[in-house]
Every structure is written in structure tokens, then in C-alpha cells.
Amino acid sequence: EAIASASERAAVAEIRASLTVQESQYRALIGELRDSEASLRTAKKMTASLLEAQHEKEAKVRVLKDKATAEKVACDELVKDLQQQITELTFYLRTQKQVDQSPQKVQEEMRGGHVVTTQQDQAHERGSGRARGRRKGNR
């Protein structure tokens, strides 16, 4: 250093000061990088956790949809059966009313006789035999 001129010494001092500033900036950047890496790891963990929760919820939704579909099918079948029972009951009540409105002699003949139905009534009975048989079994 004894040989260096004053301008060279000033230049060296300036370079050292610049180097100190750059080292400080480097350490700050390294600290920010480490913080960013830690934030990234945390975000990845949260993402994985959220994805797992989403998959669990989707599975629950699928199960609930399947249950709802099965319940709808059961309800539709019940409604169909009840509609069939209403049709049969309406037929029975209409027939009973006609019998009640018939003359006494006709009513007595009907008690000991057979019921002859039309084709429409026969088709009705074929379609309703399943529901009628089920009700008899439940009695």
C-alpha cells in the first residue's frame, strides 16, 4: 500500500465500500430467498391438504348422489304403486256404487254370481295383479 498513490487508495476504499454494500445486499437476498422457499413449502403443504379435502368431499358428494338416486327410484316406485292402488280403489268404489244403486233383485243375483268384465277391465286387472297381490300379502 505504500507504493499506491492517493487516487489508487481512494479507488480501493471505494471498491471495498461497494463490496461491503454488495455483500449486505447478497445476504439480504439470501434471507429473502430462504423466506420465499419456506413460504413455498407452506403453500405446497396447504395445497396438498386442500386437494385431499377436496377429494374427500367429492367422494362424499358421490355417495350422497348415489343415495339420492336410490331414494328417488324407491319413491318413484312407491308413487307408481300408490297410483295403481288409487286406480283399483276408484274402480272398486265405482263398481260398489253401481251395485248399491242396482235394484234389490239384481244385487241378490250379483252376490251369488260371477263378475264379467270387459276387455278394458281385464287389461286393468292384468296390470294391477302385482299390486293387488302385494296388498293381500300385507294383510
Image (tube, helix red, strand yellow):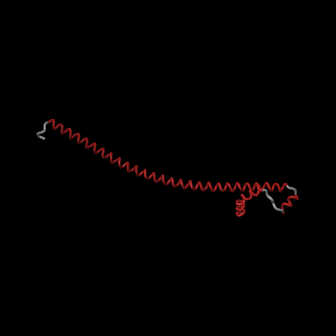
* Residue 127 image offset from top left, x and y in percent: 71, 58
* Residue at the outermost right position: 105
**Residue at the (77%, 56%) spot, across then down:** 119
Relative to residue 127, is residue 1 drawn left or right?
left
Q: Is residue 8 left or right of residue 84?
A: left
Q: Residue 39 at x, y = what percent?
A: 37, 48
Position of 7 relative to 65 (above/below): above
Q: Position of residue 124 (x, y in %)?
A: 74, 56
Is 129 left or right of 63, judged from the image as shown? Answer: right
Picture residue at 65% right of the left edge, 56% below the top: 77
Q: In the orientation shown, which residue stands out farthest toward the front?
A: 119
Quarter of image, res 94: bottom right
Q: Which residue lies at the image location 35% right of the left edge and 47% below the top edge?
A: 36
**Quarter holding the N terminus?**
top left
Left of 106 or right of it: where is 61?
left
Who's the residue at 52% across and 55% down the image? 60
Nearer the observer, 6 or 113: 113
Q: What is the count of numbered marks?
A: 0
In which quadrant of the rendered image does the C terminus lie?
A: bottom right
* Residue at the far top in the pictured view: 7
Q: Nearer the viewer, residue 110 or 61?
A: 110
The location of residue 92, given as percent across then percent down, is 77, 56
